[in-house]
Image (cartoon, rainbow, N blue to C red):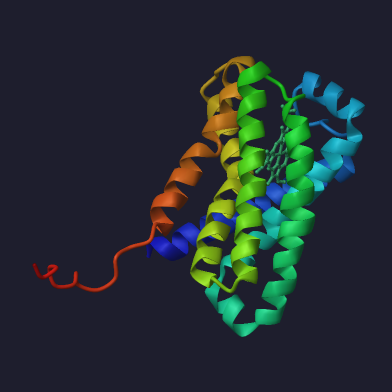
Amino acid sequence: MIRPFAWALMILGALGTAGYAIVAYTGWPAGATVHPEMRRVYAIYPYLIYPHVFGSAIALAVGPLQLSTRFRRRWPKAHRVLGRVYLGAGVLVGGVAGLVLAFHSFGGWIAHLGFAVLAVLWLLSGALALRFALQRRFDLHRRWMILNFSLTLAAVTLRIQLGLAAAAGWPFEAFYPWLAWTSWVPNLLLAWVFTRPRATGPPGPPPSR
Ligand code: HEM
Protein backbone atom coordinates (compact mmCIF):
# COMPACT_ATOMS: atom_id res chain seq x y z
CA MET A 1 0.00 0.00 0.00
CA ILE A 2 2.86 2.37 0.90
CA ARG A 3 4.79 1.69 -2.32
CA PRO A 4 2.07 2.74 -4.83
CA PHE A 5 1.24 5.74 -2.65
CA ALA A 6 4.90 6.82 -2.48
CA TRP A 7 5.25 6.32 -6.27
CA ALA A 8 2.12 8.39 -6.98
CA LEU A 9 3.37 11.14 -4.67
CA MET A 10 6.80 11.16 -6.31
CA ILE A 11 5.37 11.29 -9.85
CA LEU A 12 2.97 14.06 -8.87
CA GLY A 13 5.78 16.09 -7.27
CA ALA A 14 8.16 15.54 -10.20
CA LEU A 15 5.65 16.39 -12.94
CA GLY A 16 4.19 19.27 -10.92
CA THR A 17 7.61 20.87 -10.40
CA ALA A 18 8.71 20.28 -14.02
CA GLY A 19 5.37 21.77 -15.15
CA TYR A 20 5.83 24.82 -12.90
CA ALA A 21 9.33 25.38 -14.28
CA ILE A 22 8.26 25.15 -17.93
CA VAL A 23 5.13 27.30 -17.55
CA ALA A 24 6.79 29.97 -15.35
CA TYR A 25 9.89 30.27 -17.55
CA THR A 26 8.11 30.28 -20.93
CA GLY A 27 5.12 32.42 -19.88
CA TRP A 28 6.91 35.15 -17.90
CA PRO A 29 10.35 36.83 -17.74
CA ALA A 30 12.88 34.67 -15.85
CA GLY A 31 12.35 34.83 -12.10
CA ALA A 32 8.96 36.57 -12.26
CA THR A 33 7.65 34.20 -9.55
CA VAL A 34 10.61 34.47 -7.14
CA HIS A 35 12.45 37.02 -4.97
CA PRO A 36 13.32 40.32 -6.80
CA GLU A 37 17.04 39.79 -6.10
CA MET A 38 16.89 36.37 -7.84
CA ARG A 39 15.02 37.95 -10.76
CA ARG A 40 17.79 40.56 -11.07
CA VAL A 41 20.45 37.81 -11.24
CA TYR A 42 18.48 35.78 -13.83
CA ALA A 43 18.16 38.89 -16.04
CA ILE A 44 21.98 39.14 -16.04
CA TYR A 45 22.54 35.41 -16.68
CA PRO A 46 19.75 34.21 -19.01
CA TYR A 47 22.23 31.77 -20.60
CA LEU A 48 22.53 30.04 -17.21
CA ILE A 49 18.97 30.09 -15.86
CA TYR A 50 17.18 28.91 -19.04
CA PRO A 51 19.41 25.87 -19.72
CA HIS A 52 19.26 25.06 -16.00
CA VAL A 53 15.48 25.26 -15.74
CA PHE A 54 14.62 23.46 -18.99
CA GLY A 55 17.43 20.88 -18.75
CA SER A 56 16.56 20.02 -15.14
CA ALA A 57 12.83 19.90 -15.98
CA ILE A 58 13.59 17.22 -18.60
CA ALA A 59 15.42 15.14 -15.95
CA LEU A 60 12.54 15.54 -13.51
CA ALA A 61 9.90 14.54 -16.08
CA VAL A 62 11.79 11.58 -17.59
CA GLY A 63 13.26 10.17 -14.34
CA PRO A 64 10.20 8.36 -12.93
CA LEU A 65 9.65 6.49 -16.21
CA GLN A 66 13.27 5.37 -16.22
CA LEU A 67 12.95 3.94 -12.70
CA SER A 68 9.89 1.85 -13.62
CA THR A 69 10.86 -1.84 -13.88
CA ARG A 70 7.82 -2.56 -16.05
CA PHE A 71 8.77 0.14 -18.56
CA ARG A 72 12.40 -0.99 -18.64
CA ARG A 73 11.50 -4.64 -19.26
CA ARG A 74 8.87 -3.89 -21.87
CA TRP A 75 10.74 -1.22 -23.85
CA PRO A 76 14.49 -1.67 -23.25
CA LYS A 77 15.39 0.39 -26.33
CA ALA A 78 13.25 3.33 -25.21
CA HIS A 79 14.88 3.01 -21.76
CA ARG A 80 18.32 3.41 -23.36
CA VAL A 81 17.27 6.39 -25.51
CA LEU A 82 15.51 8.15 -22.61
CA GLY A 83 18.51 7.39 -20.39
CA ARG A 84 20.69 9.42 -22.76
CA VAL A 85 18.10 12.22 -22.77
CA TYR A 86 17.93 12.14 -18.94
CA LEU A 87 21.71 12.24 -18.48
CA GLY A 88 22.66 14.40 -21.49
CA ALA A 89 19.92 17.02 -21.85
CA GLY A 90 18.86 16.79 -18.20
CA VAL A 91 21.66 16.17 -15.71
CA LEU A 92 24.61 17.43 -17.80
CA VAL A 93 23.00 20.64 -19.12
CA GLY A 94 20.97 21.34 -15.95
CA GLY A 95 23.85 20.38 -13.66
CA VAL A 96 26.63 22.42 -15.31
CA ALA A 97 24.37 25.51 -15.50
CA GLY A 98 23.22 24.83 -11.89
CA LEU A 99 26.84 24.62 -10.73
CA VAL A 100 27.74 28.03 -12.18
CA LEU A 101 24.43 29.49 -10.97
CA ALA A 102 25.22 28.21 -7.45
CA PHE A 103 27.82 31.00 -7.08
CA HIS A 104 25.17 33.64 -7.90
CA SER A 105 22.41 32.10 -5.76
CA PHE A 106 20.46 34.02 -3.15
CA GLY A 107 21.56 33.65 0.48
CA GLY A 108 25.35 34.00 0.57
CA TRP A 109 27.98 31.31 1.02
CA ILE A 110 25.68 28.82 2.80
CA ALA A 111 23.47 28.73 -0.32
CA HIS A 112 26.42 28.89 -2.75
CA LEU A 113 28.11 25.91 -1.12
CA GLY A 114 24.90 23.86 -0.70
CA PHE A 115 23.87 24.24 -4.35
CA ALA A 116 27.44 23.72 -5.60
CA VAL A 117 27.87 20.44 -3.66
CA LEU A 118 24.44 19.30 -4.92
CA ALA A 119 25.43 20.07 -8.52
CA VAL A 120 28.77 18.25 -8.25
CA LEU A 121 27.12 15.17 -6.68
CA TRP A 122 24.39 15.25 -9.34
CA LEU A 123 26.96 15.28 -12.15
CA LEU A 124 29.25 12.68 -10.54
CA SER A 125 26.47 10.22 -9.66
CA GLY A 126 25.13 10.52 -13.23
CA ALA A 127 28.57 9.85 -14.70
CA LEU A 128 29.06 6.82 -12.43
CA ALA A 129 25.61 5.44 -13.29
CA LEU A 130 26.40 5.76 -17.01
CA ARG A 131 29.78 4.08 -16.55
CA PHE A 132 28.18 1.10 -14.77
CA ALA A 133 25.55 0.78 -17.54
CA LEU A 134 28.25 0.73 -20.23
CA GLN A 135 30.12 -1.93 -18.24
CA ARG A 136 26.82 -3.88 -17.97
CA ARG A 137 27.06 -3.85 -14.16
CA PHE A 138 23.33 -3.30 -13.88
CA ASP A 139 22.98 -3.65 -10.08
CA LEU A 140 25.41 -0.79 -9.59
CA HIS A 141 23.86 1.15 -12.49
CA ARG A 142 20.43 0.90 -10.82
CA ARG A 143 21.78 1.95 -7.42
CA TRP A 144 23.56 5.02 -8.80
CA MET A 145 20.57 6.06 -10.92
CA ILE A 146 18.34 5.94 -7.82
CA LEU A 147 20.91 8.02 -5.90
CA ASN A 148 21.07 10.43 -8.83
CA PHE A 149 17.29 10.76 -9.07
CA SER A 150 17.02 11.35 -5.31
CA LEU A 151 19.15 14.47 -6.01
CA THR A 152 16.95 15.44 -8.99
CA LEU A 153 14.04 15.36 -6.53
CA ALA A 154 15.76 18.14 -4.55
CA ALA A 155 13.78 20.51 -6.78
CA VAL A 156 10.54 19.02 -5.40
CA THR A 157 11.67 18.86 -1.76
CA LEU A 158 12.91 22.45 -1.96
CA ARG A 159 9.53 23.74 -3.12
CA ILE A 160 7.65 21.72 -0.47
CA GLN A 161 9.95 23.12 2.25
CA LEU A 162 9.63 26.61 0.75
CA GLY A 163 5.84 26.37 1.00
CA LEU A 164 5.94 25.03 4.58
CA ALA A 165 8.39 27.71 5.77
CA ALA A 166 6.34 30.46 4.13
CA ALA A 167 3.15 29.06 5.70
CA ALA A 168 4.89 29.06 9.10
CA GLY A 169 5.61 32.77 8.56
CA TRP A 170 9.42 32.43 8.57
CA PRO A 171 11.27 35.27 6.78
CA PHE A 172 12.49 34.14 3.32
CA GLU A 173 15.95 35.67 3.80
CA ALA A 174 16.53 33.59 6.95
CA PHE A 175 15.46 30.14 5.78
CA TYR A 176 16.26 30.15 2.03
CA PRO A 177 20.05 29.58 2.33
CA TRP A 178 19.44 26.42 4.41
CA LEU A 179 17.13 25.00 1.75
CA ALA A 180 20.23 24.62 -0.45
CA TRP A 181 21.15 21.80 1.99
CA THR A 182 17.89 20.52 3.49
CA SER A 183 16.40 20.04 0.01
CA TRP A 184 18.79 17.20 -0.87
CA VAL A 185 20.69 15.76 2.12
CA PRO A 186 17.64 13.82 3.51
CA ASN A 187 16.74 12.56 -0.01
CA LEU A 188 20.24 11.25 -0.55
CA LEU A 189 20.45 9.58 2.89
CA LEU A 190 17.11 7.87 2.33
CA ALA A 191 18.12 6.66 -1.14
CA TRP A 192 21.51 5.53 0.21
CA VAL A 193 19.86 3.38 2.93
CA PHE A 194 17.15 2.12 0.57
CA THR A 195 19.66 0.94 -2.06
CA ARG A 196 22.45 -0.34 0.20
CA PRO A 197 23.56 -3.83 -0.78
CA ARG A 198 22.06 -6.45 1.50
CA ALA A 199 23.59 -9.85 2.33
CA THR A 200 21.61 -12.50 0.44
CA GLY A 201 20.89 -15.95 1.86
CA PRO A 202 22.04 -17.45 5.15
CA PRO A 203 25.64 -16.87 6.24
CA GLY A 204 28.09 -19.54 5.18
CA PRO A 205 29.73 -22.04 7.57
CA PRO A 206 32.36 -20.68 9.95
CA PRO A 207 35.91 -20.93 8.57
CA SER A 208 37.58 -24.27 9.54
CA ARG A 209 40.63 -23.95 11.70
C1 HEM B 1 19.79 18.75 -8.64
C2 HEM B 1 20.60 19.74 -8.97
C3 HEM B 1 20.18 21.18 -8.99
C4 HEM B 1 21.00 22.22 -8.66
C5 HEM B 1 22.43 22.13 -8.20
C6 HEM B 1 20.23 23.42 -8.82
C7 HEM B 1 20.72 24.71 -8.60
C8 HEM B 1 19.98 25.85 -8.72
C9 HEM B 1 20.43 27.17 -8.37
C10 HEM B 1 21.81 27.50 -7.82
C11 HEM B 1 19.45 28.03 -8.63
C12 HEM B 1 19.47 29.54 -8.39
C13 HEM B 1 18.87 29.79 -7.03
C14 HEM B 1 18.96 31.25 -6.62
O1 HEM B 1 18.87 32.13 -7.48
O2 HEM B 1 19.11 31.49 -5.42
C15 HEM B 1 18.34 27.27 -9.15
C16 HEM B 1 17.13 27.81 -9.53
C17 HEM B 1 16.14 27.09 -10.13
N1 HEM B 1 16.11 25.74 -10.35
FE1 HEM B 1 17.55 24.43 -9.84
N2 HEM B 1 18.97 23.11 -9.25
C18 HEM B 1 18.90 21.74 -9.37
C19 HEM B 1 17.83 21.00 -9.79
C20 HEM B 1 16.70 21.54 -10.36
C21 HEM B 1 15.65 20.77 -10.95
C22 HEM B 1 15.60 19.24 -11.07
C23 HEM B 1 14.72 21.64 -11.39
C24 HEM B 1 13.45 21.24 -12.08
C25 HEM B 1 12.82 21.91 -12.93
C26 HEM B 1 15.19 22.99 -11.07
C27 HEM B 1 14.53 24.18 -11.35
C28 HEM B 1 14.94 25.42 -10.96
C29 HEM B 1 14.15 26.64 -11.14
C30 HEM B 1 12.78 26.74 -11.80
C31 HEM B 1 14.91 27.68 -10.62
C32 HEM B 1 14.57 29.18 -10.56
C33 HEM B 1 13.96 29.53 -9.24
C34 HEM B 1 12.46 29.29 -9.25
O3 HEM B 1 11.75 29.78 -10.17
O4 HEM B 1 11.99 28.60 -8.33
N3 HEM B 1 16.40 22.88 -10.47
N4 HEM B 1 18.69 25.96 -9.18
Q: Quadrant of ligand 1?
A: top right
Taking depth in this image into account, of 42 and 98 the one nearest to the observer is 98
- The image quarter in which residue 165 lies: top right
Taking depth in this image into account, of 10 and 202 the one nearest to the observer is 202
- Number of labelled discs? 0
Taking depth in this image into account, of 97 and 140 the one nearest to the observer is 140
In the image, farthest residue toward the front: 209
Asked if residue 53 is positioned above or below residue 174 in the image, the reply reads below
Task: Name which residue lies at 60% across and 29% down.
Answer: 114
Q: Residue 80: where, in percent of width, then height?
A: 70, 73
Q: Is residue 174 visible?
A: yes
In the image, farthest residue toward the left: 209
Q: Is residue 21 visible?
A: no
Asked if residue 133 is positioned above or below residue 172 in the image, the reply reads below
Asked if residue 85 is positioned above or below residue 94 in the image, the reply reads below
Task: Name which residue lies at 56% across and 24% down.
Answer: 178
Q: Residue 116: where, in percent of width, then height?
A: 66, 32
Q: Residue 151: where, in percent of width, then height?
A: 58, 46
Task: Name which residue lies at 8% across and 67% down.
Answer: 209
- The image quarter in which residue 68 lies: bottom right
Task: Name which residue lies at 44% across and 50% down.
Answer: 192
Q: Is residue 81 left or right of residue 13?
A: right
Q: Residue 86: where, in percent of width, then height?
A: 72, 60
In the image, farthest residue toward the bottom: 74
- Locate the N terminus and report the quarter of the image it occupies: bottom left
